[in-house]
Image (spheres, grey):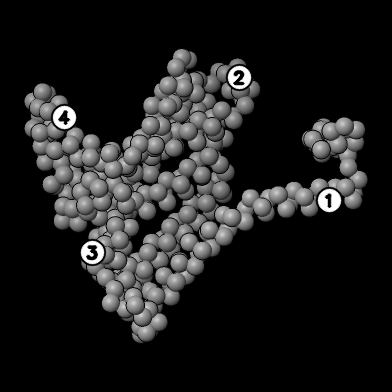
Amino acid sequence: MTQLAEKPGGVVRVHRATGRAPSGRRRHHLTSTHGRIAWTFVTPFMIIFVLFTLIPAFMALGFSFTDIKASDVRNPFGVGFVYFDTFVKVLGNAGFQRSALNTLIYVVIGVPVTMVIAFLLALVLDAGIRRLKGLFRALIYVPVIANVVAAAVIWQYAFTNQGPINSALSTLGITGPNWLSQPGTAVFVVLLLCIWRNIGTCMVLFLAGLQAVPEEVHEAASLDGAGYWRRVASMTVPLLQPTTLLVSVLMTVNFLNMFDEPFLVTNGGPLNSTRSIAQWVYEQFGYGNIAGSMAGSWVLLVIVLIIAFLQIRFLRSKA
């Protein structure tokens, strides 16, 4: 058995009983053993990933170059190739364009709002609250693990005409709108639900990043007379660039793939104002437009990859 130990050349792996570093032959044997153990754990995931994700994804790409419909499922290899015609039809479809615009609104508003609120909550939990930190952390994380169907039903009731939101507004002398029947307010409700469900994940990641910042850095800045918010802006935020990169990519992918919230709360309405790309893809498959559904899913995948790549390049260069 071996363990890590600090030696003049740095941290090395030594034999637990003798305290000596293993010989070259022994080291090669250990490396091979560790490699086999690692592959033993990774192989089941790789098999499942290839069978249920990679192969279906490339089959979807292949079928998106055809005119396959629901009636062709019994003989999928008898369909005709139309090359890029399906992609042209998808990109020119008014419903897809409206869904793309809705998804863009979700990403542009939802991602920064979620990250800012989560970051402020992480700051409060890291330095502002001295007691019951675990309780507050759990309460903020509850929406992440809450059943989305139950949450959507509660959300629908809360924003009905006679729901608690409008009742609270009426006590202030304000007549609440018909939230779920007007395009502008319906988008707001769906967006609010998605932000509420994602704040907990962002907060946990930011909190982990804050706790990794050395305390000596803040103490040195305090001795130089820097106030709290000056330390946050000049030291904490730059040191959290790797965490910010991770959170922004995760949240962007989440909002781009948003499906549950608009599907459960408004079913894409009113007037297609809340339908996301993912929901459009799902509905096309249900209508029997299999080629269009698969082409739309690949368009969404390419959008996700491009935006994630740009975010990583931009934020990594700033870090």
Q: Earlier in the sequence, mark 1 or mark 2?
A: 1
Q: Amino acid at mark 1?
A: His
Q: Amino acid at mark 3?
A: Gly
Q: Earlier in the sequence, mark 2 or mark 3?
A: 3
Q: Do the numbered discs 3 and 1 sit on residues whose CB atoms are within 8 Å?
A: no
Q: Amino acid at mark 4?
A: Pro
Q: Is residue 262 above or below residue 135?
A: below
Q: Earlier in the sequence, mark 1 or mark 4?
A: 1
Q: Secondary structure at mark 2?
A: helix
Could you say which is closer to the camera, residue 294 or residue 302? 294
- What residue is at 61 percent from the left and 23 percent from the top? 215
Could you say which is closer to the camera, residue 141 or residue 251? 141
Residue receiving disc 1: 29
Q: Do the numbered discs 1 and 4 sit on residues whose CB atoms are within 8 Å?
A: no
Q: Nearer the viewer, mark 2 or mark 4?
A: 4
Q: Residues within 10 Å of mark 1 (few under 14, many from 20)?
A: few
Q: Residues within 10 Å of mark 4 (few under 14, many from 20)?
A: few
Q: Earlier in the sequence, mark 2 or mark 4?
A: 4
How far apart marks 2 and 4 lie (CA) works out to 47 Å
Q: Nearer the viewer, mark 3 or mark 1?
A: 1
Q: Nearer the viewer, mark 2 or mark 3?
A: 3
List x then y, in percent, for residue 175: 8, 32
Q: Nearer the viewer, mark 1 or mark 2?
A: 1
Query: Quarter holding the C terminus?
Result: top right
- What residue is at 23 percent from the left and 46 percent from the top? 265
- What residue is at 44 percent from the left and 17 percent from the top? 132
Residue receiving disc 4: 164
Residue receiving disc 3: 95
Residue receiving disc 2: 219
Q: Earlier in the sequence, mark 3 or mark 4?
A: 3
